[in-house]
Image (spheres, rainbow, N blue to C red):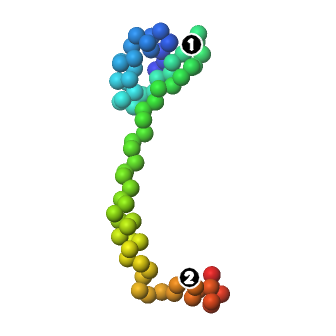
Amino acid sequence: MKTATVAAAESRLSSLLADVEVGEEVVITRRGRPLARLVPEPPAAAAFDWEALRAWVEAGPPASGATVAELREQDLL
């Protein structure tokens, strides 16, 4: 983990961001005390597949198996 003073961070921001891009953390200090931390952004989550959800909903309940109402009638739910 690298550290940099506020003044150094102001003058070397591009260099510090390049370090963060490769996975390194940078702590920015003021008067020797940690003030802020630059950390890499976590990888973006995969986009949600809305089309697959719509298809699943439109398909309706499975052809076999008991419904919730039937399970309640049988005291299984």
Q: Nearer the viewer, residue 3 or 48?
A: 48
Question: Could you tell me which quadrant the C terminus lies in?
Answer: bottom right
Q: Which mark is residue 68?
A: 2
23 up-or-down from 52: above or below: above
Which callout, 1 or 2, points to the residue nearer the camera?
Answer: 2
The location of residue 41, given as percent across then percent down, is 42, 35
Which residue is at a point 54% across and 16% down the rendered structure image?
29
Contact (Cβ within 8 Å) of mark 1 with mark 2:
no
User: Which residue, given by chain and number where applicable, does mark 1 sit on?
Assistant: 30
**Res. 35 image quadrant:** top right
The location of residue 21, given as percent across then percent down, is 36, 29
Q: CA distance from mark 1 to mark 2?
A: 62 Å
Residue located farthest toward the right when viewing the structure as drawn: 75
Q: Nearer the viewer, residue 49 or 12?
A: 49
Q: Secondary structure at mark 1?
A: strand
34 up-or-down from 62: above or below: above
Q: Determine crowd level at label 2: few under 14, some 14-19, many 20+ residues with C-alpha closer than 10 A.
A: few
Which residue is at a point 36% across and 59% down the rendered structure image?
49
Is 13 on the left or on the right of 70, as rendered? left
Q: Which mark is residue 61?
A: none
User: Is residue 1 visible to us here?
Assistant: no
Which residue is at a point 36% across and 52% down the rendered structure image?
47
Compare marks 1 and 2 and give the one earlier in the sequence: 1
27 up-or-down from 51: above or below: above
User: Is residue 44 visible to us here?
Assistant: yes
